[in-house]
Image (spheres, helix red, strand yellow):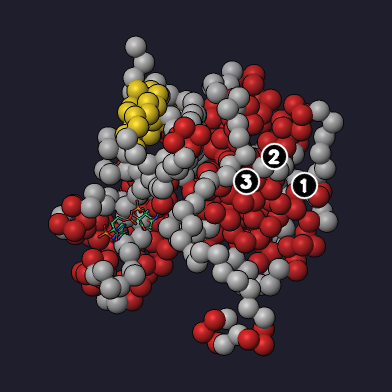
Amino acid sequence: MSETVKLEFEGKTYEFPVVTGTEGEKAIDISQLRPKTGLITLDPGYANTGSCKSSITFMDGEKGILRYRGIPVEQLAEHSSFIETAYLLINGRLPTAEELKQVSILFNDHSLVHEDMQIFYQNFPRGAHPMGILSSMANALRSFYPELQTIEEEINITVTRLLSKMRTMAAMSYKISRGHKVVYPRPDYRYSANFLHMMFDTPVKPYQINETLAKALDVFWLLHADHEQNCSTSTVRLVGSGRVNLYAAISAGIAALWGPLHGGANQAVIEMLEDIQRDGGNHQRAIARAKDKKDPFRLMGFGHRVYKTYDPRAKIIKKMCDKILEELNINDPLLDLAKELEEVALTDDYFIEKNLYPNVDFYSGIVLRAIGIPTNMFTVMFAIGRLPGWIAQWKESMDDPMWKLGRPRQIYTGPSITDYIPIHERHRCQA
Ligand code: ACO
């Protein structure tokens, strides 16, 4: 017999079905709550609310588990590539060798962006944040690449364009912000190597691809590829629920990711570590500030809405960070500082009691610095990585037979009905 939950309210009992996921997680299906009882739920930050059923990503925040389409992220980081993982997320299964080859050909064919888009780039003010530029340009893509004939063609080509062009657009924004000539992609380079080439090659100093760094970037992207219903992904689904085009939904996702409590944390971690370094390496002061309720400062790169243990992605990135710095003989004092800070925080009662562990952003900035990515481009790196997840989630929501326009409700706390006051009768306190 299927499980139910009983709700007693104003002398009546109502029954609601319990939905169980494949990993045993349970939810009360309240879709009939308001029609039956007149009640709604109130859940700030949606911490107890499941917005959809999804077969893409499974995470268990208590056990530190993350799987894409059932495959542990640790296995993918070791054996797969970002592009293969993107295929897995979007299509629901790993590609065959032939399919993967076709994907590479398509990505190469679609890697250029319309030349006229460069005019937009040229006209952003020099100090503009690359996330603002990327979000605007993702939206602008619709104007340059109008809707195609069939829905299938529209989805397949749009997905390919986004995955291939986003990387070109990100590198372009960097080049233009530095006043450098844009570098075009090369057909003989793989996805991450091509990005590094477009970022760092110059006519006077050809960039030599370093396989260790190209691999590190690929793993960084793979680890960011999806994370179920987080802030930016929920934004993509919500914006997409109005049936807007995919470019616009992705543009909204990029804007949501920009925030320092979400994807912007990787930039904020490095800035925090640099501040501590300037303060003579005094990490105790940072810990004390993070614990002080009167101080809005938080230890960036610590804590997570879902993970109440060490973020499994952070474990992989920390290991990778040690490996590449050693292999390339790079000495980054910020890494030593990060490790000291982690050690102090993990033994501090405040962080233990609140289950605050390093998240993916804590060490990823150090990896990106080693690759040579400037700090203000860190969140753009995250956006390129998260793109397959956004696309997969958007696609799933489009095919969902339970699809509905996203439209939460509220509990109104403003004034009761109030008469309009003509302007000449208004006093300041009434205005
Ligand atoms: N430093 C100090 N205290 C913290 C931190 C932190 N990094 N994170 C949470 N807390 C404290 C809060 O002050 C709060 O304390 P209280 O219960 O005494 O009021 C308690 O822990 C719970 O915090 P919430 O903000 O309610 O928890 P939530 O689940 O909403 O927060 C979040 C998750 C936003 C990620 C938070 O931990 C944070 O701000 N971390 C720093 C920013 C960061 O690293 N973001 C990246 C997250 S990963 C990602 O999005 C890719």
Residue 142's disc number: 1
**What is the CA distance from the residue labelled 3 to the residue labelled 2?**
8 Å
Amino acid marked by disc 3: Val
Q: Nearer the viewer, residue 112 or 413?
A: 413
> Which residue is rendered at x = 77% and y = 29% of the image?
151
Q: Position of residue 152 (x, y in %)?
A: 75, 26
Using residue 299 as the reference point, say whether residue 245 is left or right of it. Answer: right
Q: Nearer the viewer, residue 241 or 382?
A: 241
Is 270 drawn above or below residue 279 in the view shown? above
Q: Dividing the image into 4 quarters, which one contains the C terminus?
A: bottom right
**What is the CA distance from the residue labelled 1 to the residue labelled 3?**
15 Å
Find out if the beta carbon at label 2 lies less than 8 Å from the nearest ligand 1 atom: no
Residue 404's disc number: none
Using residue 140 as the reference point, say whether residue 361 is left or right of it. Answer: left
Q: Which residue, given by chain and number where applicable, does mark 3 sit on?
A: 239
Amino acid marked by disc 1: Arg
